[in-house]
């Protein structure tokens, strides 16, 4: 079972605030991520639950970015208690038998279980320092560092480029200011 894809779901829920603004935007997000059955079943109650989950997941990433591993684990343990994992064998879309997490119940429950279990797997397998908050100003998006050397600092190539250009310009301005 690839729990990294579930952890990426957590990143998506944290970063895509606008997709939790209405049922229509949530449905579009679910369809975009291949969750068409969930999109058809999503309710206002799911939307409210996912907004709350988003805030809790954001706290996990903020704690990780601050280097507070104990708080990350405490937050994830609390979420694991509230969203217990129910694995299920599934075979769909011509794929071989494989594991899924919580296919039944409310849409929000399935997304919560997957997100929380994915993050818990990353933290226990790779370390809490693999979760972070983008260091590009003013971006505050979460990211999952799957690089081999733990070097990721930005949520996207766009933010990395923007930060590198800003640093270059700052160095140029400092150099030009000192030479005068």
Image (cartoon, rainbow, N blue to C red):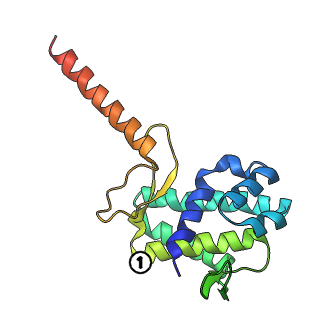
Is 91 rendered above or below residue 128?
below
Q: Look at 32% across and 62% down and name the residue there.
A: 150
| Residue 23 image point, x, y percent | 81, 54
Q: Quadrant of the C terminus?
A: top left
| Residue 144 image point, x, y percent | 46, 61
| Residue 153 image point, x, y percent | 38, 51
Q: Look at 26% across and 20% down and name the residue there.
A: 173
Is 114 rendered above or below residue 145?
below
Q: Looking at the image, which is closer to me, 160 or 175?
A: 160
- The residue pinned by badge 1 equals 125
Left or right relative to 127: residue 2 = right
| Residue 87 image point, x, y percent | 64, 86
- The answer to whether residue 119 is visible is no
Label 1 Cα crowd, 10 Å radius (few <14 / some 14-19 / many 20+): few
Q: Look at 77% across and 80% down and name the residue there.
A: 104
- The answer to whether residue 118 is visible is yes
Left or right relative to 10: residue 145 = left
Is 34 rendered above or below residue 92?
above
Q: Quarter-wise, where is residue 36 in the image?
A: bottom right
Instruction: Give the total of numbered labels.
Output: 1
């Amino acid at each position: 079972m690839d729990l990294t894809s579930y952890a990426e779901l957590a990143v998506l829920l944290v970063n895509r605030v606008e997709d939790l603004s209405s049922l229509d935007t949530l449905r579009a997000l679910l369809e975009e991520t291949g969750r068409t059955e969930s999109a058809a079943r999503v309710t206002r109650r799911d939307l409210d639950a996912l907004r709350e989950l988003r805030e809790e997941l954001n706290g996990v990433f903020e704690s990780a970015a601050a280097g507070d591993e104990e708080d990350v684990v405490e937050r994830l343990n609390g979420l694991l208690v509230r969203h217990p994992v129910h694995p299920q064998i599934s075979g769909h879309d011509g794929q071989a038998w494989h594991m899924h997490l919580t296919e039944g119940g409310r849409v929000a429950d399935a997304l919560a279980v997957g997100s929380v279990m994915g993050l818990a797997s990353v933290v226990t397998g790779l370390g809490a320092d693999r979760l972070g908050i983008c260091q590009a100003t003013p971006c505050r998006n979460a990211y999952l560092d799957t690089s081999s050397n733990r070097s990721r600092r930005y949520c996207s190539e766009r933010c990395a480029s923007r930060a590198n250009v800003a640093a270059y310009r700052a160095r140029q301005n400092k150099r030009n200011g000192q030479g005068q």
